[in-house]
């Protein structure tokens, strides 16, 4: 099984549970790849020969961040990555599953036609129910039959699901 892990900024020091998931995957027969616009502290995934795919996104540089913020404001829909490049990389990755860590990473997956899990971790879900750009993007994601959401608690799932119109 091949999983594409999408995360805005990948590094062992910022999200230990994500790096642990990626690093342990080969030991149970899963082939992980990490797609991110910024990498740091990746010695172990390099040592394990886990493929890193560089995305162009808000974490890439200030110009890209400015352009994506402008796009989000103009079209009232949040964008984390340059959509056409991002979608092309995912569709050509031959992934069995795409795992977008944090809701922001999943906002550009509205047209994906592969099994996808979007893990909401807390902040991203709270922003989704308060910010119209996030809310618009998440509502479109909720209509895609390939996309599923996970939440850290039942309370949080109910809170966000209600606002997004997800099945309880």
Image: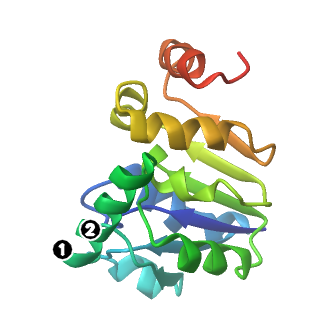
The reply to whether the C-beta atoms of the residues labelled 1 and 2 are less than 8 Å apart is: yes
* Residue 138 visible in the snapshot: yes
Left-right relation of 33 to 19: right
Q: Residue furthest left?
A: 62
Above or below, 87 relative to 145: below
Residue in the image at 54% along x and 30% along y = 151
Residue in the image at 46% along x and 48% along y = 77
* Residue 102 visible in the snapshot: no
Within-10-Å neighbours for mark 1: few <14, some 14–19, many 20+: few
In terms of depth relative to the viewer, which is nearer, 119 or 83?
Answer: 83
Name the residue carrying label 2. 65
Left-right relation of 113 to 148: right
Badge 1 marks a residue whose secondary structure is: helix
Q: Position of residue 162 (x, y in %)?
A: 58, 15
What is the quadrant of the N terminus in the image?
bottom right
In terms of depth relative to the viewer, which is nearer, 40 or 60?
Answer: 60
Above or below, 151 relative to 48: above
Q: Position of residue 133 (x, y in %)?
A: 41, 41
Badge 2 marks a residue whose secondary structure is: helix
Above or below, 99 relative to 34: above
Q: Position of residue 53 (x, y in %)?
A: 50, 83
Q: How many marks?
A: 2
What is the quadrant of the C terminus in the image?
top right
Image quadrant in which you'd find residue 79 = bottom left
Left-right relation of 43 to 50: left
Within-10-Å neighbours for mark 2: few <14, some 14–19, many 20+: some
Name the residue carrying label 1. 62
> CA separation, marks 1 and 2?
5 Å
Residue in the image at 44% along x and 78% along y = 55
Above or below, 114 relative to 63: above
């Amino acid at each position: 099984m091949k999983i594409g892990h999408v995360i805005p900024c990948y590094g062992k020091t910022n999200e230990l549970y994500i790096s642990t998931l990626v690093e342990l995957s080969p030991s149970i027969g899963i082939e992980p790849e990490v797609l991110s616009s910024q990498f740091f502290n990746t010695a172990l995934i390099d040592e394990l020969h886990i493929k890193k795919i560089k995305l162009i996104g808000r974490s890439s540089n200030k110009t890209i961040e400015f352009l994506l913020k402008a796009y989000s404001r103009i079209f009232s829909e949040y964008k984390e990555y340059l959509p056409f490049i991002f979608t092309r990389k995912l569709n050509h990755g031959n992934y069995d599953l795409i795992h977008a860590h944090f809701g922001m990473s999943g906002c550009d997956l509205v047209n994906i036609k592969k099994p996808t899990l979007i893990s909401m971790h807390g902040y991203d879900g709270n922003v989704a129910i308060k910010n119209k750009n996030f809310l618009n993007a998440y509502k479109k994601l909720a209509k895609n039959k390939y996309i599923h959401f996970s939440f850290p608690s039942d309370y949080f799932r109910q809170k966000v699901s209600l606002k997004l119109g997800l099945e309880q």
